[in-house]
Amino acid sequence: MTRPEIRVRDLHKSFGDNQVLKGIDLEMERGEVVCVIGPSGSGKSTLLRCVNLLEEPTKGQVFVGGTEITDPDVDIDAVRRRIGMVFQQFNLFPHLSVTENLTLPQRRVLGRDKASAARTAAENLARVGLSEKAEAYPASLSGGQQQRVAIARALAMGPQVMLFDEPTSALDPELVGDVLAVMRRLAREGMTMMVVTHEMTFAREVADRVVFMDGGVIVEDGTPDQVIGAPRHERTRHFLSRLLDPAMAEVEEETSDQVGGPAQ
Amino acid sequence: MAIDTDAELQPRKSGLTPRQRRRLSRGAQYVVFVAAVVALAAGADWGRLKNQFAQAHIARQLFPDLITVALKNTVLFTLSGFVVGLALGMVIALMRLSSVGPYRWLAGIYIEIFRGLPALLIFIFVGTGVPLAFPSIEYPGGIYGKVAVALGLVSAAYMAETIRAGIQAVPKGQMEAARSLGFSPARAMVSIILPQAFRIILPPLTNELVLLFKDSSLVLFLGVTLEQRELSKFGNDLASTTANSTPILVAGLCYLLITVPLSLVVRRMESKAKREIR
């Protein structure tokens, strides 16, 4: 149990000349919930996408469950089966019904038979509270419902780790709560979760640790009370004050040390 | 050009108001249209037109071969060409999107060549050039195989570009979601991307089918037997034996019988797709 579930070592990622990650070291224990916060362009989404190799790191290593996924010989499709991912834009398959969204990956990727795939799908739809939408198509669902289906789809694959890339950023404010409730419950059930988010209340309440990133490096890493409640770094304080009270932001002078790539 | 002075906002005292001018222009367009129709109708010799194009007894002679031979062959040629073109176009589209450079170049060269050449030249090339160069090669299915290859080569270039556009129109997040669930790239393409791409390109593919119906008339340059004639050749042959153009008109109507409903279907699909846009 001492082996960390996720271990990131000296991770670098560049897009052309643009250095987005400049040496990230991070470890996550099994069952831990880590929220990654930071301004847009700080590299937090890129970090998340490196953990399941949707982005190929330029340098460094990533271990998930003891397997080095940055090893060129690793079967990345097999590794990804253990890592669930939830996207900002939901990315449900629009040509499939809700149930088919959950069953098709199980059958094609895991080779489950029709009946057991359907059973797993039904269980996970119930878990996110959307059993009554089983036959609906994604286009007829609200954003919040689509995101919960996306979570159920990832869960149906039986992942050991879940990655969330700004799961509530594309939602209307009144729909955010339902998605966060599902995630909170998942955290309580002991899922290992890495969540890139702007929801500070969620981070404070649910996260075991909060990581603040800026300019491609981890600036601060600690309990929510430390990082959000009593940030030690000026950059963290500045970010949090703008996030918690956006109306108070001043027009900033251009500074040359502003780093980071385009918003992801 | 400032127009905020009071004088410019006032209606002009002399001349027509904008509304009157619009009405006048619309009226003029109707007058021109009616005049053109009347002139055409008065200028044509209706008796001779009827003699040359609408002889009922000649039209009757065309049956049943018009349907059982000519129309049947047109449909067969077109569909077999479409199937070959779709399969080949699919391969070329995937090559065009490949990460392997030479595949991309090869696909690009194919598309440029076969889109740039008249279909007629390709028919002659397939019909005479290939058998001369490779005497041992025989097209399966005789003339039908030859036509399928010729029409397939022509349409594959267009369909490849259509399919490529369809694949690229599927949002990038779909592939990412599939990969993150553990799909291999090939599996994701087949199970997730292509079904969505084909929905998007169904209307342009159907248009391609309409174009192929017309291109199938080029078969006559391959040399066909009586039993292998399609609509155009059939109509043309009978027009010369009967010394009358009625068969041409009837053959033309047969084409429209197929292409007009297809076009309507395309239009239906397009307006439906427009309504379904998320």
Image: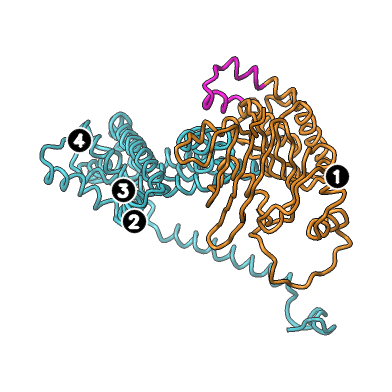
Give the residue pinned by disc 1. A225
Residue A118 magenta-highlighted:
yes
Q: Nearer the viewer, mark 3 or mark 2?
A: 2
Give the residue pinned by disc 4. B139
Report the chain shown in cyan: B
Find numbered disc 1 in the image and state the secondary structure of the residue it sits on.
helix
Camera-nearest residue between A171 and B91: A171
* Quadrant in which residue A208 is drawn: top right
> How far apart are the alpha carbons under marks 4 and 1?
77 Å
> How far apart are the alpha carbons under marks 3 and 2?
43 Å
Report the chain shown in orange: A
Q: Nearer the viewer, mark 4 or mark 2?
A: 2
Locate residue B100 relative to residue A8 in the image: left or right: left
Q: Callout 3, which amino acid? A: Gln
Locate residue A78 relative to residue A178 in the image: left or right: left
Q: Residue at x 37, y 48 (%)?
A: B100
Q: Callout 1, which amino acid? A: Asp
Camera-nearest residue between B67 and B197: B197
Specify the farthest residue to the front: A2
Which mark is drawn over residue B52? 3
Taking A4 as reference, is A38 above or below it? below
> How far apart are the alpha carbons under marks 4 and 2?
25 Å
Q: Chain of mark 2?
A: B
Q: Position of residue B270 (x, y in %)?
A: 56, 44
> How far apart are the alpha carbons under marks 4 and 3?
40 Å
